[in-house]
Image (cartoon, helix red, strand yellow):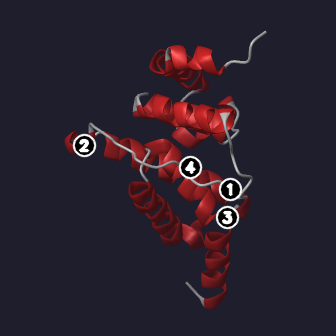
Amino acid sequence: MDQREEQEFAEYFVARREAVRRTAYLLCGDWHRADDFAQTAFVALHRRWRKVRDKGALDAYVRRSLVRAVIDESRRPWRRERFVDELPERPNGDGEVGDAVATRAALLDGLKLVPPRQRAVLVLRFLEGLDVAGTAEALKCSEGTVKSQTSRGLAALREALGSALDDLRPAS
């Protein structure tokens, strides 16, 4: 790459690294592995930087690389169990308290129990804000697959959360 392309990549990396790292954490539940997955996604992008024609699609390319890396790694036999001791920091320092912290902790604990592909769909749909078509494109699958994985993932998350979900709902 020439100097200008390196500068463009560096600017994109600086602008997006924390968001990609947080997404990776939501997908895998471990900050150290999230760093590795984010690095893997950015290395893949760097290798293909010259070939990327639509710079508006960079986020989609990095997201797809990230999700694929997490799913591929989850299939390895030594990655069957995952343990996390800390919660992710808030990027804007809002200062979560009380119910918000309990809700977030319960959600993260529940996501760790959802199968990797379903977790990827839930994170992309509900935490990254992608629609069905965008999620299907990121995962390179059909929209029907996204819908079924969303349904199954939500059911698995409800089961994982159990009564904790009922305790977190406001009284009617």
Residue behind mark 3:
53
Q: Position of residue 8 (x, y in %)?
A: 67, 78
Q: Position of residue 159 (x, y in %)?
A: 47, 15
Residue 69 seen in the figure? yes
Residue behind mark 2:
76
Alpha carbon separation for disc pair 3 and 4: 24 Å
Question: Can you say whether 6 is above or below 157 in the image?
Answer: below
Residue type at tag 1: Ala
Residue behind mark 4:
23
Quadrant in the picture for residue 58 = bottom right
* Earlier residue among tags 2 and 4: 4
Callout 4 crowding tier (Cα within 10 Å): few <14, some 14–19, many ≥20: many
Residue farthest top in this picture: 172
Q: Nearer the viewer, residue 140 or 41?
A: 41
Residue type at tag 4: Thr
Alpha carbon separation for disc pair 1 and 3: 9 Å
Q: Is residue 73 left or right of residue 78?
A: right
Callout 2 crowding tier (Cα within 10 Å): few <14, some 14–19, many ≥20: few
Question: Can you say whether 88 is above or below 166 in the image?
Answer: below
Alpha carbon separation for disc pair 1 and 2: 30 Å
SS at badge 3: loop
Q: Which mark is residue 57?
A: 1
Residue farthest bottom in this picture: 3
